[in-house]
Amino acid sequence: MIHLSETGYHAGRLFCLGIKAEEDTSAHGMYAPLHLADFRGKCCQKCLKVWADEAYDEGDEMPDWIVSMRASVVS
């Protein structure tokens, strides 16, 4: 699984605030190829949900997957 992580002062902290398993990898959310559905399919759903909820402001033009993810509940 690929987790999304922060950059800057908190670089490496996972968006989901979880602990990365040995077989997991991470990618900085800001630079991750989130426009690619195949890449998103390998990502932690909790990390993606944080990105979807925080990366865009209301009124911004958003990709369809962001709109769908904002409407979904991820457990």
Image: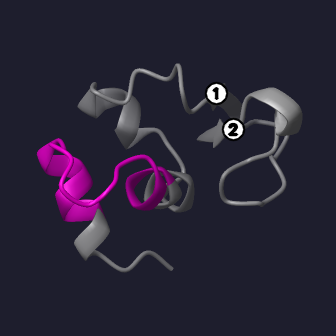
Res 10 label: none
Quarter of the image holding residue 23? top right
Identity of the residue drawn at 37% across and 38% down: 40
Residue plotted at (33% across, 54% down)? 57
Contact flag, marks 1 and 2 (Cβ < 8 Å): yes
Residue occupying image coordinates x 54% and y 62%: 46
Give the residue type that dot 2 points to.
Ser
Q: Is residue 71 left or right of residue 48?
A: left
Q: Position of residue 15 (x, y in %)?
A: 66, 52
**Residue 34: in magenta span:** no
Determine the image quadrant of residue 2: top right
> Which residue corresponds to the image point at 61% horizontal and 39% vertical from the top-left?
4
Whether 29 is drawn above or below 72: the answer is: above
Q: Is residue 55 above or below residue 67?
A: above
Residue 66 shown in magenta: yes
Indicate left or right for 23 with 38 as reference. right
Q: Which mark is residue 28?
A: 1
| Quarter of the image that includes the N terminus | top right
**Circle nearer the N terminus (1, 2):** 2
Residue 62 screen position, x and y as percent: 19, 45
- Nearer the observer, 67 or 72: 67
| Label 1, residues with CA under 10 Å away: few <14, some 14-19, many ≥20 | some
Whole-percent x, y for residue 36 in the image: 28, 25
SS class of the residue under badge 2?
A: strand
- Report the number of discs: 2
Which amino acid is tagged 1?
Answer: His
Q: How is the image coloured?
A: one colour
Which quadrant of the view contains residue 68? bottom left
Residue 29 image point, x, y percent:
56, 33
User: Which contiguous range is marked in magenta?
Assistant: 51-69
Q: Which residue is mark 2?
A: 5
Alpha carbon distance from label 1 to label 2: 5 Å
